Amino acid sequence: MKKMEELKNNEKYKKLIAYLKNLESAAVAFSGGVDSTFLLAAAREALSDKVVAFTVRSPYIPDWEIKEARQIANKLSARHMVFETEISDSILHNPENRCYLCKKFIFTRLVGEAKKLNINYVIEGTNSDDTGDFRPGIKALRELDIKSPLLENKISKEDIRYFSRLLNLETWDKPAYACLLTRIPYNTRIREEELRRIEHAEVFLMTLGFKGVRVRSHNNLARIELNKEQITDIFQNSLRDKIVNKFKDIGYTYITIDIEGYRTGSMNLKEG
C-alpha cells in the first residue's frame, strides 16, 4: 500500500498516466523488456481494456524473449498479439541504417494492425536517456507518428526501474537487451543459422550466471562482452573450458573476451 501511495503521488507518474488516458486507446510495441513492460503496465492502468500488446516474432528475436513477453503480458492481464515476420529484404546485408529500415518495416505493420482493431495509436518505450545514443530508428518512429510516452514525459531509465519496482514488476532489474542483428558487423549478409548460433551462445552464458551478455560474431570468431565486474569470473579454469568447448561445438573457431566489457553500440565503432 505504501509503495502504491508513493507511486500515485509521483508527479512524473501522474503526468504519464494522464498522457496515456488522453490517447483513449493504444497498442504497445512490447518486447517484455524493462521499458515496454513498464509502459504496458502504465497503459493498462490508464486505459484498462483499451490497450493491447503487440509483439513481433522474427528470426533476429530470440525465442526466449518471445516466451518471456507472453508470460509478462499474461501476468498483467493484457491482451497480447504476436506477429510473425521475416527479415526485410532492405536489411539482408545489415546496412548501417539497418535500425531505421527495420523500425520502418516493423512499425508500418503494427500501425496497420492497430487500424484493423480501431486503436488510435501505437506507442513504444523509448525513454529520455535513449536520445544520447546512436538511435536511427527514432527517425522512423517519428515518420510514422508512433508515440513515445516515456520520452515525451521525460522519464529516464532510472525512473522506469524505480516505478517498476513500486509496481512489483519482475523486470525492474532486468538487463538491457537488443535484437540479434546488433551482434553482427555492418554490411555483412545476415543468415538465420548465424542468428541461431549467436542466440545459442548467449543463452549458454546466461545459464552460467552471466547477465547482460553479448556475443559479437565475426565469422568464426566470437567476441564475448560481459559486465565489467564479471570479466574475471570467466577465467576460472572449469568455466573457461566449458565455454570454449560449447562455443566450438556450435561452430566458433576462436573465442575471445572483450576486456573493455559490455557497452551499447560497440558495433558502431569504425575500424582504422
Image (cartoon, rainbow, N blue to C red):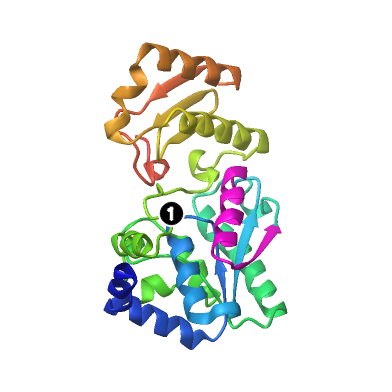
Which is nearer the eye, 5 or 146?
5
Q: Position of residue 152 (x, y in %)?
A: 37, 76
**Range drawn in magenta:** 61-83
Tell me, yes or no, if residue 101 can be seen here: no
Q: Position of residue 65 (x, y in %)?
A: 56, 48
Which is nearer the eye, 88 or 178?
178
Q: Is residue 89 left or right of residue 95?
A: right
Q: Residue at x 51, y 74 (%)?
A: 44
The picture quadrant where one finds residue 155 is bottom left
The picture quadrant where one finds residue 90 is bottom right
Q: Is residue 9 left or right of residue 164?
A: left
Q: Position of residue 201 (x, y in %)?
A: 53, 29
Farthest residue to the front: give it: 1
User: Which residue is the site of mark 1?
Assistant: 171
Magenta stretch: residue 35 in it?
no
Amino acid under label 1? Thr
